[in-house]
Structures are given as C-alpha cells and as structure tokens.
Amino acid sequence: MPREASIWIVIAVYVVFMAAAGILSSKSTKGMAAFTVGGRNAGAWISALSYGTAYFSAVMFIGYSGSSGWSFGLWSVLVGIGNAVLGSLLAWLVLARRTREITHRLHIKSMPQLFEMRYGSRNMKIFSCIVMFLFLVPYSASVYKGLTSICSVVLGIDETLCMVLIALLSALVLVLGGYAATLKADFVQGIIMMFGVAVLIVLVVVSPQVGGLSSGVSRMAEYMQHNDMAPLPPQAALSLLSTILMTSFGTWGLPQMVHKYYGIRDDREVRRGIVISTFFAFLVSGGGYFIGSFSHLFFGSELPSGGKDYIVPNMLNQAHLPDILIGIVLVLLISASVSTLSSITLTACSTVSMDLVRGWRKPNISDESTARLTRILCLVFVAASYAIANYPTPILEMMSYSWGIISGAFLAPYAIALYWKGINRAGAWAGMVGGFLTAFVPAAVSGFTTPNGPVYACAAMILSVILCVVVSRIASRLNWKSGQLNPVFYTATVEEWRRTH
C-alpha cells in the first residue's frame, strides 16, 4: 500500500471517532451548564488528560520543541521538565481544589464570572471577556500553523487545505457536543498522545541521525561545546529561562486551562488528577522537547527550508519512520491540536455568550438560546483563527503574544484571590491592566514581530502580581471604595451571594 494511503487511513479512523464523539454528546448538551462545564461530574483521568491535551498541542511539538532545540540544544529539555513540575504538578496543587470548590459553590462557569463575583465589578467582567476573545485567537492560529507545517512536509498537501480540514473537525466537535464532547474526545486523545510520544522518542533516538541515546547525547554535547551553547551565553540563558517560565506559569492564567478545574467531581478526583496530569506532562512535554533537542544532528548548523517551524516536521520525515507510525504521529499532533483548539474556542465563545450577551446586553435570553449562540460564535472564532494563521509570524512568537497578554492580565487577580482575602477591586484592576499593557504594548509597537515575546510575558506576570498586592494595600489603608473586601465570596452559597449583591 502506498505511504500516503496508509497515513490517510489512520487519519480517517480518527476523524470518524471524533465525529461520533460529537454526535453522541450532542444529545446530552441542551443547556449552557452541560455545554460549558459538562455537569461538573468529571473524574480524575478525564479531567487530567483534558488538561494535558489542552496544554500540549502542535504548538509545543512543532513550534516550541523545534525552536528551543535549535536555540538551546540539550538545555531545551528543561522547558519540558518545567512544564511538568510548574505547569502541571504545582498548578494542580495550588489551583485545582480551591478553584473547584469556589466555582461549584457559586455556580461559576467562566473566569469573567469569577472576577465579577470576587471583585463586584461588571466592567471587569466585560473587559476580561473582550481580552479573552480577541487574544485567544492568535493562540488558536498558532495551532493551525503548527499542523500545517508537518502536513505539508509529510503528506505534501496544500497548507490551506490542511487548515480548512482542521478547522472543520474542531468546529464539528464543538458545535455538536460542547464540553462533554471535548472531555470524551480528550480522554482518548490523551491516550493516543502518550502512546505516540513514547514510540516516537524510541524511533527518533535509534534513527541513523541520532544513533542511539548515549551516542546522540554525546554528539549533541560536543556540538554545543563547539557552538557556544555549553554553557549558554547570558542572552540565550535569559531566553531559555523566560520560555520555561512563560510556558509553565503562563498556564496558571489561561482561562481554557483554569476551566478544566470547574468540572471536577470532588476533592478525591483532584488528588488523583495531580498525579495523572504530572505524569502526562513529563512524558508528552519532556518527550517533545527531548526530540527537538537533537535537531542539530539532523541539519548541522543550517536551518531547513521554511525556518524553525519546519525543524521537527523535517526531522520526522528524515528519520524514515514506518508509514503506520507516521500516521499515528500525525494523529497524535491532530489530537493534541484539536483538543487545544476546542478548549480555546469553547472558552472564548462561551464567555462572550454568557457574560457579554446574556450577562449584560440581553439578560432574558434563554439557556438554550445562549447555547445556540455559543455554537455560532465557535464557528466565527474558528474562521478568525484560520485568517490570522495566514499572518507571517512564527509559531512560537504568535503563541507568546497570546499567553503573555492573557496570563499577564488574569493570572494574579485570579490566583491571589484564591488564597488572599485582602486583595480588592483596586488591586485587581491595577494588576489586570498593568499586566495587559506590559505584554501588549511592546508586541503592538513591533507590529507583532518582536522575538522577545516570552520575556515580555514573564515581565507582565511578575508586574501584575506586584501591582495587585501593592495597590490593594494602598487602597485598603486609604479607605477607597474600591478597596473594600468581599468576605462573602469565600463562604456564601450562590443564593446568599446574590442577596448581598
């Protein structure tokens, strides 16, 4: 059987499964609660794998692992370790249980709702809705770019056609089944990703270019010694550190990641989810960056045609992997990317329909109509992502703009509020706006072409934390109206909260 036919058969089986998941889930997603949080009854495996598949997409496998491996060599594996320890283990330990408890008790379905109920500010809810919808689009677009690069290299198909196919697949799952469909699909996709990455690591390591683990590591270490990469120069070390911090702590403020905690069944499932999500991240992220760290053994010092976005696709193409495995690898990347796209799209669109339309402009709209509007917005979002994906910005930078702006704005007001009752509306506004501007202004001034996106993203998150704390204390001491506390948020039921507000 021809190579392309074998690969397409594997992909076709996956597409049929995804369509079936969407159709079967559509029967149980009639209202917004079912469409957005799936009835809040998710177990540990589903929640953890859904978190992991939303975390790691073609952006990581293609954009970040290739670019980091090229720039930092074996040091790039530290990014994968950081993602597992800081972005998964520590994130679940710090955020999951408290987020689950608050969102269950107060029936919160989105991050903008959490901000409104914690800080008593409708304007903050509106601002966060707009930021989410606008700046999740570049992240979604970066996922498209990651997939098109490998499909064009391995299958030789037109990049535009690839983008259209992925957009249609993501839209199908979302419009039909919403959160329930993505959870079920994510569970199977997570298994595919773990199996695919494990096999991929072995076959890349034994490829002629690498020549085995000890030989490959030894040759890469020698290459790094002769090319000023061991140790890294100060500028490169700063870039590596900022990449680790942005891709790890950045997830703490991303609404589509935080959203995974809302639907967990109970604290027991949270504890189990911590272990599962950490193992998943070590294997998938650590494995992805480990593969990318051998890029110079394939290409020497000359980048392949197309630039850094095409490093990993050409590595896989040159490693002479079996046809069936190439198909599995593509399904692995499609799985990871569709999961991420679904999470991004659902988060961005549901918050617009719930928090902007129903929560502000048309409060009397029915639950079913809101769910219908969300489905329509999902189609609009997918189309916008496709359009932005054609903008000539590298994958890594496109994603860093999105993560920096959104996490810079949201991480501190959200995470601090889980533990510190002293944060107030003035502090939250200062942190939100300060973090947003720190990441947005440099990117906008450069025409979204600056190569320092991760550095600005880290600066935005750090500054936002400082502003939240400092301005909250100032507002409290000066008895500003915006400095008042909201202790009811931490103990009240949703009915009690509504009576006091």
Image (cartoon, rainbow, N blue to C red):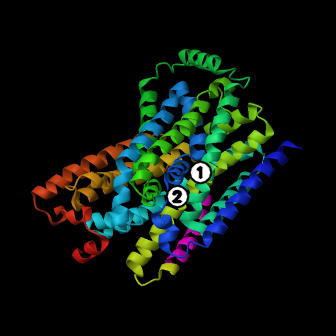
- From this view, report whether residue 445 is shown above or below residue 133: above
Q: Is residue 374 left or right of residue 158?
A: left
- Closer to us: mark 2 or mark 1? 2
Q: Which residues are magenta?
A: 370-388
Q: Which residue is mark 2?
A: 344
Tell me the amino acid under the disc marked 1: Val
- As for residue 295 lying within the magenta part, the answer is no
Is residue 457 visible from the viewing direction of this image?
no
Quadrant containing the C terminus in the rendered view? bottom left
Numbered badge on residue 143: 1
- Residue 44: percent from left, percent from top: 49, 51
- As for residue 378 lying within the magenta part, the answer is yes
- Residue 317: percent from left, percent from top: 74, 35
Dot 2 and dot 1 residues touching (CB under 8 Å): yes
Q: Is residue 381 left or right of residue 134?
A: right
Q: Between residue 214 and residue 319, name the one nearer to us.
A: 214
Q: Secondary structure at mark 2?
A: helix
